[in-house]
Every structure is written in structure tokens, then in C-alpha cells.
Image (spheres, rainbow, N blue to C red):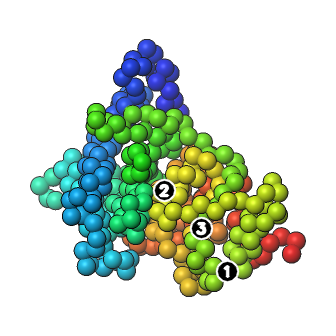
């Protein structure tokens, strides 16, 4: 394991400069035998895309990028103008670098091939370009989620098989949240680190080192508007959290933004649990495995938390398609364990 502590990697690092995302990735690369720099180059491209998207989000109300395009995507959702912009920015920033062989996006029906003119790399990038589309026009935090795998095909253009890998095979995952500040949070599996964008310098600086999720929190995050469709186990679990039967004897507080990145970011930093369960109306839930659940599960586990579908570990689900959905219970390890027990039992223990 490589420490992210600047003093342990590069003694005497200048405090006045701070620890930039680029330097953080480069220092870690130097400790990996045989590293080619491809991962570093890919990450730099993703960070560039994040800076461009952040710039566009910050002036969305002034630049005619609010509102819908009139197009409905493969998920059955109305595509917003910023969705399209963010999707295009990510593809353009990454495709020419020679670091990936193929990409996949929540917004595209099929895989996104690397144009023939560009070299094909050893990585696969999958992403949700702008999570929280329904919140765009009301100025609520939104974000970008990304997941990186190594290709499984030998060479040449990437295929769908390169994308359809279990979350356990991820080499990195992260998200960029566009809120009161812009933050990039990522993990390569041995720690979770957060970097805040300084808009004047145009660089991400380390602000949250080695993030750890508390074993138990005091809040839950779920769309209670779906209560009428919940299974008995989910209903019993939420009723318990809202009562004096909650862990610790004090009711949990409800915190729900409706943007996965925002709800997970709060949970990552403060503990608790986020859930989008399957229900009678939508047994597989709403969230996409490849673009949302698997990357967030990778981060949660790297920070000491947990992520489950209610039936098993999210990271162990082998995708059967690019846009597969799965239920999600994610956050503090003990809170997720409680949720899974309720879901599997179908009712509160002892009732």
C-alpha cells in the first residue's frame, strides 16, 4: 500500500504549494514497478474534463445550457442540455490520449469506440457524465461518476466484453461533485482521497486525505415517496430507523438530495446509509450497476464502508448488459448490515 501522506512519499514537500492531484497520482506511479504512465495520463484527462464541466455548470444559467434537449435516453429519461455537454466533454478529453480502448456512458445505448485515428490503450472508462439531471435546473449539487477497468481483450478496438466486468475488477473509481465547491474524490482500492478545485489556479488540491466512513452514522437517505411500493423488509427497516428502536436509541435523521453523488458524498464523510432499494414497482431499483453502483461501492469499501444489493455484495455482481440496474444499500458498514438483515428477513427482527 502506498501512503498518500505527502511527507511519507516526498519528504520536504513545500507546504505553500499544497498537494495537487497531478502530483499525488505521479508520486504513486513512481512506486509501482513497470508503471507506463497510461493510468496517470487517463486520470489527467478525466480531471481536465471535470474542470471544463465545472466551468460550464458554474455559468449554466447564463449560457443557455439549462433545460431539456427533447431527447429520451436508453434509461427512458429526458436528456438535459448539460447531460449532453458533459458527455461530449468526457469523450473528447479522453478519446485521443491512447489510454483507453473503449468507453461506455449512461447516456449512450451502445459502447463508445475510440476513433480509428487514435491509438487504443489498455484501460476501459465508464461514466455517468452528469448524475442528478433532475436537479440541474434548480441549482442543486450534481456530479460526474467514473469507473476504470483494465481491458480483457488482447488488442485492437475495445468491445462490450471489456465493459461487462464485475466491480471487483475495477482498478480505480471516483466522482466529481459540483456544489459549493468542486471536489474530485477517487480511490485505486487502497484509500479514498478528496481534492478540491481552486478555480483561480485551475488545479485540484488535496483537501480530504484517507477518508474513512464511520462504522455507524446517524442519518439515512432514501426516497420516501416510493414507500407505497416498498417491500415489507424495507418498510420495517425505515420505520425502525425513525423510531427509538434505532441503533443507539435515537431516531436517525432523514437527508435526501436526489443526486446520488451528493447523497453519497455526505454519507462518505459523515456516515449513515443511502438506499435505493428494489420494490414492487421496480424490483431492480433505479440505479445503474456500471455507471453508479459499482464505482460508488468501490469507494465505500475502500473507505471502510459497505455496499450491498440486499442479496449480496455489489462489487461481485457480474453485469449482463451495459445498462443493468441493481438495488443499492451503501454507507457505514453496520448500517448497511442492518439494512440487509431487514431486507432478507422481510420484517424487523423480534416483531
Q: Sequence-wise, which precedes: disc 3 or disc 2?
A: 3
Residue 73 location in percent, x, y?
Answer: 32, 76
Tell me the residue that label 2 is attached to. 262
Q: Position of residue 165 (x, y in %)?
A: 44, 61
Left or right of 215 in this view: 256: left
Instruction: Give the answer, above or below, for where 215 lies relative to 284.
Output: above
214 vs 199, left or right, is right
Q: Circle 1 sits on which residue?
A: 231
The earlier-in-sequence mark between 1 and 2 is: 1
- As measured in the structure, the alpha-carbon distance from the residue carrying label 3 to the one carrying label 1 is 14 Å
Quick one: SS at disc 1? Answer: loop
Give the residue displayed 41% in from the left and 39% down from the top.
Answer: 196
Dot 3 crowding, Cα within 10 Å, few <14, some 14–19, many 20+: many
Which label number is shown at residue 96?
none
162 versus 94 height, above or below = below
Spatial CA distance of label 1 from label 2 is 26 Å
Q: Nearer the viewer, mark 3 or mark 1?
A: 3
Amino acid at each position: 500500500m502506498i501512503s498518500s501522506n505527502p511527507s511519507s512519499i516526498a519528504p520536504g514537500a513545500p507546504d505553500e504549494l499544497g498537494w495537487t492531484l497531478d502530483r499525488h497520482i505521479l508520486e504513486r506511479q513512481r512506486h509501482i514497478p513497470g508503471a507506463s504512465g497510461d493510468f496517470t495520463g487517463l486520470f489527467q484527462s478525466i480531471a481536465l474534463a471535470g474542470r471544463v464541466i465545472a466551468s460550464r455548470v458554474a455559468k449554466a444559467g447564463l449560457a443557455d445550457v439549462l433545460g431539456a434537449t427533447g431527447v429520451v435516453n436508453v434509461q427512458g429519461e429526458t436528456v438535459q442540455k448539460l447531460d449532453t455537454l458533459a458527455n461530449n466533454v468526457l469523450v473528447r478529453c479522453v478519446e485521443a490520449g491512447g489510454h483507453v480502448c473503449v468507453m461506455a456512458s449512461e447516456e449512450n445505448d451502445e459502447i463508445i469506440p475510440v476513433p480509428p485515428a487514435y491509438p487504443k490503450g489498455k484501460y476501459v472508462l465508464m461514466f455517468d457524465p452528469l448524475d442528478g439531471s433532475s436537479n440541474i435546473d434548480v441549482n442543486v449539487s450534481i456530479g460526474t461518476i467514473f469507473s476504470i477497468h483494465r481491458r480483457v481483450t488482447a488488442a485492437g478496438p475495445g468491445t462490450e466484453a471489456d465493459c461487462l466486468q464485475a466491480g471487483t475488477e475495477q482498478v480505480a473509481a471516483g466522482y466529481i461533485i459540483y456544489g459549493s465547491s468542486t471536489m474530485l474524490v477517487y480511490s485505486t482500492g487502497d484509500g479514498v482521497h478528496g481534492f478540491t478545485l481552486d478555480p483561480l489556479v485551475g488545479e485540484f488540491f488535496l483537501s480530504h486525505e484517507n477518508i474513512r466512513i464511520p462504522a455507524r452514522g446517524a442519518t439515512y437517505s432514501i426516497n420516501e415517496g416510493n414507500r407505497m411500493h416498498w417491500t415489507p423488509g424495507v418498510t420495517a427497516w425505515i420505520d425502525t430507523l425513525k423510531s427509538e428502536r434505532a441503533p443507539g436509541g435515537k431516531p436517525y435523521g432523514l437527508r435526501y438530495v436526489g443526486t446520488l453523488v451528493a447523497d453519497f458524498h455526505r454519507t462518505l464523510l459523515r456516515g449513515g446509509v443511502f438506499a435505493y432499494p428494489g420494490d414492487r414497482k421496480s424490483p431492480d431499483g433505479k440505479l445503474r450497476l456500471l455507471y453508479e453502483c459499482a464505482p460508488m461501492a468501490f469507494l465505500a469499501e475502500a473507505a471502510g464502508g459497505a455496499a450491498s444489493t440486499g442479496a449480496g455484495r455489489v462489487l461481485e455482481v457480474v453485469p449482463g448488459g451495459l445498462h443493468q440496474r441493481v438495488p443499492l444499500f451503501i454507507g457505514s458498514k453496520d448500517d448497511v448490515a442492518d439494512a440487509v438483515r431487514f431486507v432478507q428477513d422481510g420484517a424487523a427482527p423480534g416483531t
